[in-house]
Image (tube, rainbow, N blue to C red):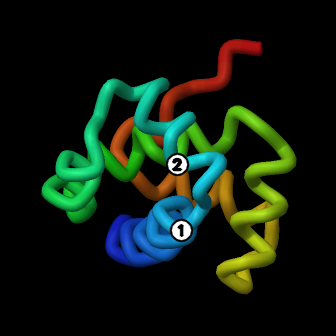
Amino acid sequence: MKQEVAETRALELLAWLVGEEDLMPVFLGATGASADDVKARAANPDFLASFMDFLMMDDEWIIKAAEATGQAPESIAQIRAGLPGGQLPNWT
């Protein structure tokens, strides 16, 4: 997936997260980011990559996010792969 497409789709997922009253505080706590940081850095590809890493920590989050944004759950990994650091080798 091209980086531009991955960024757009990751932004859609991030917008979903912002509306999740239970999950957004978990993201902020895990990353140390504030709501203002999310707004200021939302267009930053590295920030989006970190967000995607967070989202991919739980299958339930992936399914909920995919359903809410009309994306296939398996596309989440493809989106992450299109962002910086997503093409790291798999050593397992």
What amino acid is at disc 2?
Met
Q: Badge 1: few (under 14), some or many (20 or more) residues near its Cα, within 10 Å?
A: few
Describe residue 68's horizontal placement relative to residue 63 as left or right. left
Of 90 and 60, the residue lying toward us: 60
Residue in the picture at 63% in, 59% down: 78
Give how far across and how far down residue 9 sits, in percent.
49, 74
Q: Which mark is residue 24?
A: 2
Residue bearing the label numbered 1:
19
Residue lying at 67% horizontally and 59% vertically, measured from the top left:
76
Q: Residues within 10 Å of mark 2 (few under 14, many from 20)?
A: some
Location of the C terminus (image quadrant)? top right
Residue 40 lies in what quarter of the image? bottom left
Residue 25 horizontal/vertical position (percent): 50, 40
Mark 2 in CB contact with mark 1 (< 8 angstroms) = yes
Q: Is residue 12 left or right of residue 44?
A: right
Mark nearer the N terminus (2 vs 1): 1
Residue 81 place in picture, x, y as percent = 53, 50
